Image (cartoon, rainbow, N blue to C red):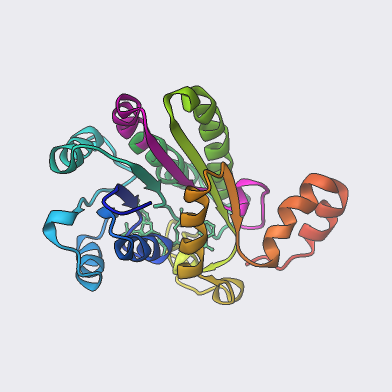
Amino acid sequence: MYKDKIIWITGASSGIGEALASALAKEGAKLVLSARRTDELQRVKNTLNLADTNSLILPFDLSDTKNIQELTQQVISKFGRIDILISNGGFSQRSFAKDTSLEIDRKIMEVNFFGTIAITKSVLPYMLAQKSGHIVVMSSIAGKFGFYYRSAYAASKHALHGFFESLRMEIATDKVKVLIVCPGKIKTNISLNAINAEGATHNKMDASTNLGMSAEACAHQILKGIKNNSEEIFIGGKEIRAVLIKRLFPKLFSKLIKKQKPE
Ligand SMILES: NC(=O)c1ccc[n+]([C@@H]2O[C@H](COP(=O)([O-])OP(=O)(O)OC[C@H]3O[C@@H](n4cnc5c(N)ncnc54)[C@H](OP(=O)(O)O)[C@@H]3O)[C@@H](O)[C@H]2O)c1
């Protein structure tokens, strides 16, 4: 299914994005790899033995998407089409709402929400013209409920659901699909790279993240979700049960979630 497909992955320099690049390279996909750090994207390309003809490194910052149309044009010039966009790039938060400035809240929204919809809006006209395409967007279980230290992060992920559920309905007849992925705890650098109230990196591996599912297993589930034309998938360990508990027993959920350790 993925052989020779043109797949653009953001956040491909690390964690889940890198694991997706690795799994898709094995399937023979042609990959466009984006993130801010060019050297890390180059490392991923070298590790995966990607040939220049089958890959493109396209660094950019999701908080500054002024030139996103030029970048999209570069992908189209090289490969002629985009089959799958995996909008995975993003970062987390470790600070209480009361201590976090509006500037930091906006920074999180800018990358996780506006950056994600900017690349989507840039790719969308090509997918609509092709009458095919798959948009995969990386939310979180924090896109389904709030948690300690995650006010702006959870808001940015909740916002993705509102946007992409609406978009899915609007483009269904054009044969462009939307998959929203909600991981729980996945063992990546997410907590190390999260920002605190001052905007500095948290720089600490959370104990629960350290015990999380591997990025490779997560990538495997995501590729299965794309193949199955799923609309929304939950990936992780027992923490993802919280989504169902909230839906079915909201009062019980409220009691249980407050007892969880903030980290
Ligand atoms: N790990 C989890 O437990 C978990 C759970 C739920 C959801 N998620 C979501 O999964 C996605 C991937 O996270 P991960 O766990 O793989 O963490 P990660 O290892 O920290 O990877 C984050 C990726 O996003 C890129 N990125 C961050 N800020 C960016 C920016 N301003 N512009 C462009 N790229 C940026 C990073 O690359 P550069 O630093 O090179 O830019 C990196 O490639 C995120 O959207 C995250 O919210 C993760």
For this view, does 202 lie left or right of residue 96?
left
For this view, does 113 lie left or right of residue 141?
left
The C terminus: image quadrant = bottom right
Query: Ligand 1 is found in which quarter of the picture?
Result: bottom left
In depth, the one of 163 and 32 nearer the eye is 32
Q: Is 121 within the magenta?
A: yes
In depth, the one of 110 and 11 nearer the eye is 11
In the image, is residue 4 above or below residue 202? above
In percent of width and height, residue 54 lies at 18, 55
In the image, is residue 18 above or below residue 166? below
For this view, does 182 lie left or right of residue 136?
right
Q: Residue at x 41, y 51 (%)?
A: 88
Can you tell which quarter of the image residue 128 is in? Answer: top left
In percent of width and height, residue 213 lies at 56, 71
Task: Report the magenta residues as a range.
Answer: 120-149
Q: Residue at x 41, y 40 (%)?
A: 134
In depth, the one of 76 and 224 nearer the eye is 224
